[in-house]
Every structure is written in structure tokens, then in C-alpha cells.
Image: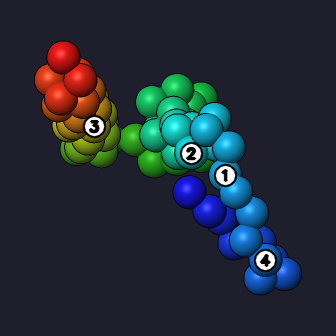
Amino acid sequence: MENQTETGKRKKLSFREFFSLGEVGEYFFRKKDPNRPSNINLKMMHGVNKISIAIFLVAVLYLVLKRLF
């Protein structure tokens, strides 16, 4: 749980930073960009990607809870 800064020194990541959903959260909850091309194939691809990410996160949560209890 360490992160390397620009100067080469390592800094400890906090618990909150380690479990942040940065890019995944942006993928699910971003605003519509009017400059981005939109067609049915692109919409379907992003829909399938969102479903697969959600199922993966549910499976990881299930495995963690199964180990704990």
C-alpha cells in the first residue's frame, strides 16, 4: 500500500485512497459528453462493460464475505 511520488520517495496510501473507486466511479457516473460520438454499438458495448464490472464487484464482495463468515 505504498505510492511513489515525483521525487522518488514513497508515501503510504491511506485506507480511503487504497479503496477509492476513482476511474470505476467515473465510468458509471460521468456526465454525457456532447462531443463524443454515439451509436447503438457503442451504447451496447458500454452497457455490457458496466454489467460485467458490477458482476465482478459483487463476486469479489461475495468471496470476501464468504471468507469472513
Question: How far is the residue under mark 4 from the one under mark 2?
Answer: 18 Å
Q: Which residue is mark 2?
A: 18
Question: How far is the residue under mark 3 from the one under mark 2?
Answer: 18 Å
Q: Amino acid at mark 1?
A: Leu
Residue farthest along the right direction in this orientation:
7
Residue 1: x, y in percent? Answer: 56, 57
Q: Amino acid at mark 2?
A: Phe
Residue drawn 24% across and 30% down? 64
Q: Which residue is mark 3?
A: 53
Residue farthest along the top direction in this orientation:
69
Does residue 65 lie above or below 15 as drawn? above
Disc number placed over residue 13 in the picture, else none: 1
Could one spot residue 58 in this view of the protein?
A: no
Disc number placed over residue 64 in the picture, else none: none
Kindly indicate whether the residue at mark 1 contacts the one at mark 4 (C-beta within 8 angstroms): no
Q: Amino acid at mark 4?
A: Lys
Q: Amino acid at mark 3?
A: Ile
Kindly indicate whether the residue at mark 2 contacts the one at mark 1 (C-beta within 8 angstroms): yes
Residue drawn 75% across and 63% down? 11
Residue 10: x, y in percent? Answer: 73, 71
Q: Could you say whether the residue bearing mark 4 is in a helix, strand or loop? A: loop
For label 2, the crowd category at 10 Å Cα-Cα, with few meaning under 14, some 14 to 19 and many 20 or more, is few
For label 1, the crowd category at 10 Å Cα-Cα, with few meaning under 14, some 14 to 19 and many 20 or more, is few
Q: Which residue is mark 4?
A: 9
**17 relative to 44 in the view: left or right:** right
Q: Could you say whether the residue bearing mark 3 is in a helix, strand or loop? A: helix
Please tell me whether mark 3 or mark 2 is closer to you in this view.
2
Say whether disc 4 or disc 2 marks the residue closer to the N-terminus. Answer: 4
